[in-house]
Amino acid sequence: MPKPKVFVTRLIPDVGLELIRADCDIDVWPERLPPSPEILRERVHNCDGLVSLLTDKIDAALLTAAPRLRVVSNFAVGFNNVDVAAATERNIPVGNTPGVLTEATADIAVTLLLAAARRLCESSTDAKEGRWLTWEPRGWLGADLVGRTIGIVGMGRIGHAVAKRLHFGWGMKVLYTARNLKPEIDMELNAQSVSFETLLAESDFVSVHADLNATTNGMFGSRQFAQMKPTAVFVNTARGPHVDQVALAQALRTGTIFAAGIDVTDPEPLPADHELYQLPNCVIAPHIASATPDTRNAMATLCAANLLAGVRGERLPHCVNPTVYSSGSSD
Ligand code: GLV
């Protein structure tokens, strides 16, 4: 029997490629930049399985061009790059990699929060560029963390991991929004589920961890920044389109909020001449939240497990559209 054919759109860690290679006829895109939509369509045409990245657009046209496709395994926890409805219509399960990147992502959220609050990038740049004149009693004053309030927008796994770090590490009061009530978290962290408006008005730090979907797209605009404290620090490690970046730049420029730390932008990469780079109170990382060897290896292993289950016609360990299975239960 011929081995299933699989296209992998980038060099994911070897541990994942080896698992796939053992059972499949694998074609790996070797370039640093993603394949163009035309090349992707051409390469996936005869494939049974596809490993995609968050930079690959997996839309209805692509799925139609791949009539044999039995699984899309996304090398990410987020899956807004995949038209899940179109995949479901074609009975194609879509896999993602939840759980394994929770801690690394929470670490970056806290790193950005601290860096923005304590003006780390701005003061470091000043030092490198000759503006460190002396020890200044009034220089580079930032925001304190202890005893302040963190507002978590989207209390899923990553939001919870961030809240734990800030509550147990810095004694922060935790407010959050979530699709469902979380009585265990309320108990563990003395956390409080509140309305989005209350969270914006009462938090000293606001950290975004919601999925990107039609409801959350653009959820941070000028109105929301205006509702936040002028001392507030805004952190986004979720997805760039949650935020209206023109409004964010304006809020940072005019002192509507104190600072921001973002790991995600729209588009990615953010063009080098973008205004946000010019603002000293904006810390920008190039989407590195899951970038540790252990985390990326774990993502590759899980991504391979989803892929292999899909090409074998078995249920994916982590499927975002479980309605493709007759039993219909979620992971
Ligand atoms: C990264 O952003 C991911 O969704 O895994």
Image (cartoon, rainbow, N blue to C red):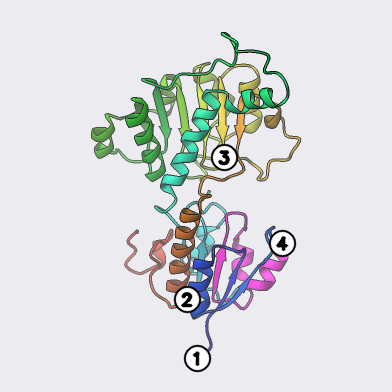
Q: Residue furthest front?
A: 134
Residue 183, percent from left and from top: 25, 37
Ligand 1 has an atom within 8 Å of the beta carbon of the residue at disc 1: no
Q: Quadrant of the C terminus?
A: bottom left
Residue 87 versus residue 76 in the image, above or below: below
Disc 1 residue crowd, few under 14, some 14–19, many 20+, Cα 10 Å: few
Q: Residue furthest top?
A: 137
Cα distance between the residues tagged 1 and 4 = 32 Å
Query: For the residue marked with disc 1, what is the amino acid?
Result: Met
Residue 242, percent from left and from top: 55, 38
Which one is nearer the viewer's eye here, 331 or 170? 170
Which one is nearer the viewer's eye here, 264 or 42? 264
Residue 263 is marked as: 3
Q: Pointers 3 and 2 in contact (CB under 8 A)?
A: no
Query: For the residue marked with disc 3, what is the amino acid?
Result: Asp
Disc 3 residue crowd, few under 14, some 14–19, many 20+, Cα 10 Å: many
Q: Which residue is mark 2?
A: 311
Q: Quadrant of residue 40?
A: bottom right
Query: For the residue marked with disc 2, what is the amino acid?
Result: Val
Q: Which residue is mark 4?
A: 36
Cα distance between the residues tagged 3 and 2 = 33 Å
